[in-house]
Amino acid sequence: MDITKRPHKQQKEDQDRDWTRLPGGDPNKQNCVYMLLSYTGLYFNVWIQEAKDWCKCDLDVLDDYLIDLICFNGFFYLLTEEYNIRVLNAAYAYSTIQTQGYKTEIDTQFFEIEISLDIPRESEIFHYLVECGEEILLVLLLREFIHVTYDFMVYRLDMCIKKWVKLDSLEDCVMFLGRSSSRCYSAKELGGDDMRNCIYFTSCFRSSMDWENKLSCYLEKDYRGVFRLNSDGSERFSYLAKRGKKRQPFWLTAPMWWYFIKFRP
């Protein structure tokens, strides 16, 4: 999840690098809606190009914090701490702010979603929402107190029965997951059958500017890696550099707007 266009300069307290930023459509179009999810999980902001400022949207339930979001088929899906879902229609948000101004109230639909979990209490959990074809997937990365990944789980959102359905295989899919950007591709299209059914964890910290955070880069060296969904263990993907230091792999992806251009060079 990333945003390549920063609308209106934020005040100092709103420039925290822990914001999660996401465009709800093609940033090149006038009706694109932008969302900022606060690192506190207590509220989110919405902005359109005609607005003078961000529209702040507070939660009506303060004991179920927001922890991640994704834009899917014109709707924002916001994941809560209890694995429930809040949904915001991007077209509704655009129309409301355009006609009533940025100080108006934006309502979300709340859905209680069932999930089956068997996770030790001492585990630290990182959550990733990712679009995979015509589905929304939730990936949970589990790590121990000593910053070592020991397991992960993948679920598919079924809004018809209001449940997170656990998956045993990703089939042809390969995922690249990070706190600032998550992508899902077909291994066949990438030309690497060995990559199918794999998840590449590139970062776990919430910061949208991980490369600026030397501490997070150091702490993450023990639990970034490559995992297969049908494997009991992990396949560490690192190599020894000079001075015996571990170096992690990295992947370069184009900015979000690039994917919306019809004719690319």
Image (cartoon, helix red, strand yellow):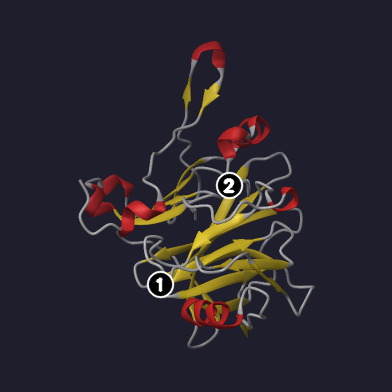
Dot 2 and dot 1 residues touching (CB under 8 Å):
no
Residue 60 pos. (x, y %)? 75, 80
Closer to the camera, 35 or 113?
A: 35
Residue 2 pos. (x, y %)? 49, 53
The secondary element bearing badge 2 is classed as: loop
Residue 18 pos. (x, y %)? 66, 50
Residue that numbered label 2 is attached to: 208
Name which quarter of the figure residue 213 lies in: top right
The residue positioned farthest toward the top in the image shown: 243
- Whether residue 188 sits left or right of residue 73 in the image: it is left
Name which quarter of the figure residue 220 lies in: top right
Spatial CA distance of label 2 from label 1 is: 24 Å
**Amino acid type of the residue that numbered disc 2 sits on in the rendered structure:** Ser
Q: Earlier in the sequence, mark 2 or mark 1?
A: 1
The quadrant of the image that shows the C terminus is top left
- Whether residue 183 sits left or right of residue 210 in the image: it is left
Numbered circle sitting on residue 135: 1
The residue positioned farthest toward the bottom in the image shown: 160
The secondary element bearing badge 1 is classed as: strand
Numbered circle sitting on residue 23: none
Residue 262 pos. (x, y %)? 23, 59
**Crowd tier of the residue under label 2, counting other residues whose Cα lies within 10 Å: few below 14, some 14–19, many 20 or above:** many
In the rendered view, tell whether residue 173 sits above or below residue 223: below
**Amino acid type of the residue that numbered disc 1 sits on in the rendered structure:** Glu
